[in-house]
Amino acid sequence: MWRGPPGRVGLFRRSAHTYDPAMADPTITIEPISGVLGAEIGGVDLAGDLSDGTIAAIRAALVERHVVFFRDQELSPEAHMAFGRRFGELDTHPFVEGNATHPEVLDVITEPDDRANFGGGWHIDVTFLPEPDMASILYALEVPPAGGDTLFADLHTAYDTLSDTMKEMLDGLVCVHSAGPQYGAGGYSTKSKAMATRNEIESHNEVRHPLVRTHPESGRKGLYANPAFTTGIDGLRRDESRALLEFLYRHATHERFTCRFRWRPGSLAMWDNRSVMHHALFDYVGQRRVMRRITVKGDRPV
């Protein structure tokens, strides 16, 4: 791994995606915000014509720090989508209505009379898909004066710190994932009045993914289960599965594996769904919050 001057993070030089240090953009800054994950990137206008070197540096920071943040951006939906497409094909959500003009865009709105927020609770985005999204890119338009922060948890470091005996037991286990608990009748995400859901019956379909997945770019192993969409572990009884998963969730979300981002209008977060869980806090009841989200398609976990 190459490390640049102070204030820069390393660029991965292994895996299918090779990052050449010479491609790094010397005009941007990348500052870690916690011990294990998260970095704030400065000196970039995401609505501009970004060079391949800048995109490579952002992607390398994303792989190494798992979530990256930008401040003071002015992004139209078109510019937001154009930035996302530099990392891959955009996805449309199968259970939430997208923007009427741009179906790939989710207008994530919490109204003052909502009693639930979209994205509340620890989760990894869309693990109920056979090929879950690689990255999510969330942009803030209107936020409350305080509250509404987002927490992120590093699933690689959480795995690394388990005992060898626990790792040996987890490797090879397969988890069942379903959107039903969130998007089925009465599911958590249907309680937000501002977010329209659809395809209720299909939400109960199941897919299976390894409990421990290998990141295709960094080669690191990480936990791959979440309270929102993981419904069990193949081969275990329900009580056994619940006990093991609850232990892993408590372990993975310990404060030493997390970072916290405070939003301002014009802030943007991009996170690697292969590496993190996140939790959108709902501590601003009675206030309005307006965000815009797109996601980049990914591959089947291995």
Image (cartoon, grey):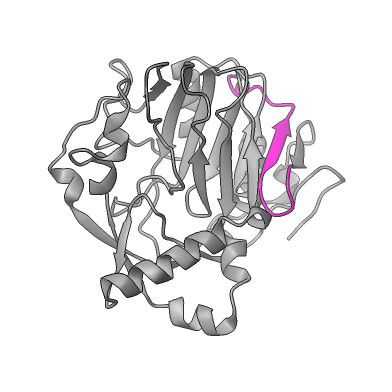
Q: Is residue 107 left or right of residue 276?
A: left
Q: Is residue 229 left or right of residue 45?
A: left
* Residue that appears at 43% across and 49% down: 124
In the rendered view, tell whether residue 209 sits above or below residue 70.
below
Choose top left, top right, bottom left or bottom right for residue 177.
bottom left
Depth check, front residue: 5 or 171? 171
**Residue 170 picture location, percent across and down:** 44, 76
**Residue 52 picture location, percent across and down:** 61, 36
In the rendered view, tell whether residue 32 sits above or below residue 261.
below
Magenta stretch secondary structure, dominant = loop
* Residue that appears at 19% across and 32% down: 198
**Residue 62 picture location, percent across and down:** 61, 46
Choose top left, top right, bottom left or bottom right for residue 189.
top left
Q: Is residue 207 magenta?
A: no
In the rendered view, tell whether residue 244 sits above or below residue 153.
below
* Residue that appears at 54% across and 42% down: 271
Depth check, front residue: 235 or 70? 235
Residue with the most extreme left position: 201
Magenta-highlighted residues: 33-49
Depth check, front residue: 40 or 58? 40
* Residue that appears at 75% across and 39% down: 30
Q: Is residue 56 left or right of residue 178?
A: right
| Observer able to see residue 42 | yes
The number of discs equals 0
Depth check, front residue: 219 or 156? 156
Residue with the most extreme right position: 6
